[in-house]
Amino acid sequence: LRDYQDTISTEAVGILKRKNMILLAMEVRTGKTITAFETCKKLKIKKVLFITKKKAISSIEKDYWYYRDDFKLTIINRENLHNLIVNDFDVVIIDEVHGYSSYPKPSKYFKDVRERFGKLPLILLSGTPTPESYSQFYHIFQLSVYGPFKEYKTFYKWAEKFVNIKPRNLGYAVVNDYSDAVKSKFYGMIKHFILTYTQKESGFEANINEMILEVEMKPITYQIINKLKKDLVVTSSLTGQSIIADTAVKLQQKIHQLSSGTIKFEDGTTQIIDNSKAIYILEKFKDYKIAIFYNFIAELQMLKETFGAKLTTDLEEFNENTDKWIALQIVSGREGISLSVADALVMFNIQFSAVSYFQSRDRLT
């Protein structure tokens, strides 16, 4: 246990006793899980529920090994929460809690957690509690019935007081934009629930070497994208299936998909069109052990077909002494896992603004 983890866990005990909820906003690699477990140990807790993502479970189990004699731990993937029958826990730890904090409407996990565990002491963990907007604080603290915003029954009521609400034109409709929450107006209400710690404070150092690699795609990919930008629809002469981009948002999504070499049709089916990027990765990184983050399901299928037995999606198999590569979905696989054995992380087709980008460039990145 590091000194700062010991100190933070002691402070967390006091907050949890007074408030029934604590947010450990500790940056990645500073030891949020260990700090939460130490908090439970100091509280002499007997039964703990840990809600997390599937790929993080093995890492949490390793941390729990040091506390196996202090309390009983149940770890569950948040997607399987409905399968959990018992509800007699002393404390509930919610990992990567920013995943519950979409706005203006809550995430699909929010309601289940609040209804089942909202009256229990909660330890909330996140390195980035509000990655998109300070408006995300509302649903984070509404997970508990004891939260500081309990007088505001809905996000919209809260937003009337704490958000600069602005109209936003999406091209096909004008909607309210709730992203501009004024933190200074409500931070005094939440600061007593939060403990923070940064990598810099912990002495953690990481050197990141970031490169953008450009890949020339097959002519068919450029043809489809150009036609889609012109006509907003492309129909296959072989299957009769259509790619439809009748809004600016859909056009951006479809170009993003096509630039990876895949597409998802209106009926939900997918097709691999161009495997140029997968082949490039195979050749460029053949002498390295790498982890690949992808966006779309069809991209994973392309990677599997191109890499064959060299690819796994199992973190434990990847971390073993093998030459296997791993493919992880960018949203579900980016948090709470260790990829220390990887020589490089390959972000497959992660783009900033596909539509504007392709209007100014004739290469796909």
Image: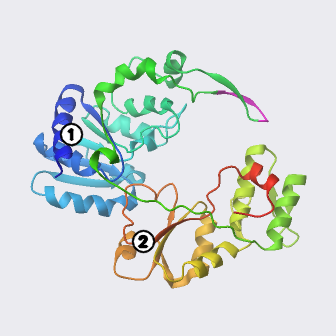
Q: Amino acid at mark 1?
A: Ile
Comparing 192 with 305, the one in front is 192
Classify residue 30 as left or right of residue 279. left
Q: Name the residue beneath numbered marker 1.
A: 8
Q: Position of residue 40 (x, y in %)?
A: 17, 44
Q: Position of residue 320 (x, y in %)?
A: 34, 78
Tell me, yes or no, whether the highlighted magenta stretch contains residue 268. Answer: no
Give the residues drawn in magenta, as a range. 171-176
Secondary structure at numbered mark 1 = helix
Comparing 257 with 105, the one in front is 257
Q: Name the residue beneath numbered marker 2.
A: 342
Classify residue 281 as left or right of residue 229. left
Mark 1 surroundings: few (<14), some (14-19) or many (≥20) residues within 10 A = some
Rendered position, 42 above or below 259: above
Mark 2 surroundings: few (<14), some (14-19) or many (≥20) residues within 10 A = some
Alpha carbon separation for disc pair 2 and 1: 31 Å
Q: Would residue 266 be seen by someone viewing this image from the given angle?
A: no
Label disc, if present, on residue 291 of the rendered structure: none
